[in-house]
Image (cartoon, grey):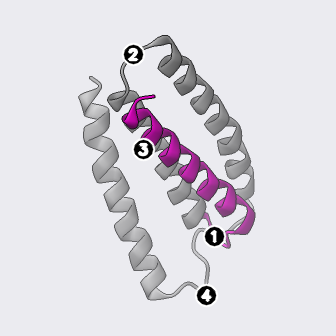
């Protein structure tokens, strides 16, 4: 197996585990949104980094399908939560803002490379 494929699979599984944990334990939409965006970055990076073969294409389709199912759960759960937890500290909010900027900064050029 290709080392890039192994790394992409591990990143995807980690991001999906974080999204599932955010769905189960989050007290606000912020964490669910950031976890969902991390999975989107992983899927976009996988599409950009992996060669186009039958195995990688079907693996990517399966990963996107699983993300769509979990994303639906995340949407339903997030509708019940406030946008920001009233008890969230300034440090938590700052960390979330920085993480959002990092994810967007990584995802945007990766998407542009696919064009």
Q: Can you tell which mark lies on residue 28?
A: 1
Query: Which tag, 1 or 2, sits closer to the chain's start?
Result: 1
Q: Can you tell which mark lies on residue 52?
A: 2
Q: Nearer the viewer, residue 44 or 3?
A: 3
Mark 3 falls on what kind of element? helix
Where does label 4 land, which residue? 87
Which part of the image, by quadrant, shows the N terminus? Answer: top left
Instruction: Tell me residue 68's x, y (percent).
Output: 64, 35
Find the distance from the CA under tag 2 to the CA under tag 4: 46 Å
Look at the image and say whether residue 27 sits in the magenta stretch.
Answer: yes
Mark 1 falls on what kind of element? loop
Location of residue 21 with respect to 86 vertically, above or below: above
Find the distance from the CA under tag 3 to the CA under tag 2: 18 Å
- Dot in front, 3 or 1: 3
Find the distance from the CA under tag 1 to the CA under tag 2: 38 Å
Find the distance from the CA under tag 3 to the CA under tag 1: 21 Å
**Pointer 3 local density, CA inside 10 Å: few below 14, some 14–19, many at least 20:** many
Which part of the image, by quadrant, shows the C terminus? Answer: top left
């Amino acid at each position: 197996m290709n080392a890039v494929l192994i790394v992409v699979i591990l990143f995807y599984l980690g991001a999906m585990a974080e999204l599932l944990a955010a769905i189960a334990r989050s007290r606000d939409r912020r964490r669910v949104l950031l976890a969902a965006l991390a999975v989107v970055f992983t899927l976009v990076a996988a599409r950009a980094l992996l060669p186009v073969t039958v195995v990688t294409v079907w693996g990517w389709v399966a990963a996107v399908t699983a993300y769509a199912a979990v994303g639906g759960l995340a949407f339903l759960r997030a509708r019940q939560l406030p946008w920001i937890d009233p008890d969230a500290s300034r440090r938590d909010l700052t960390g979330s803002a920085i993480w959002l900027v990092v994810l967007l900064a990584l995802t945007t050029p990766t998407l542009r490379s696919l064009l």
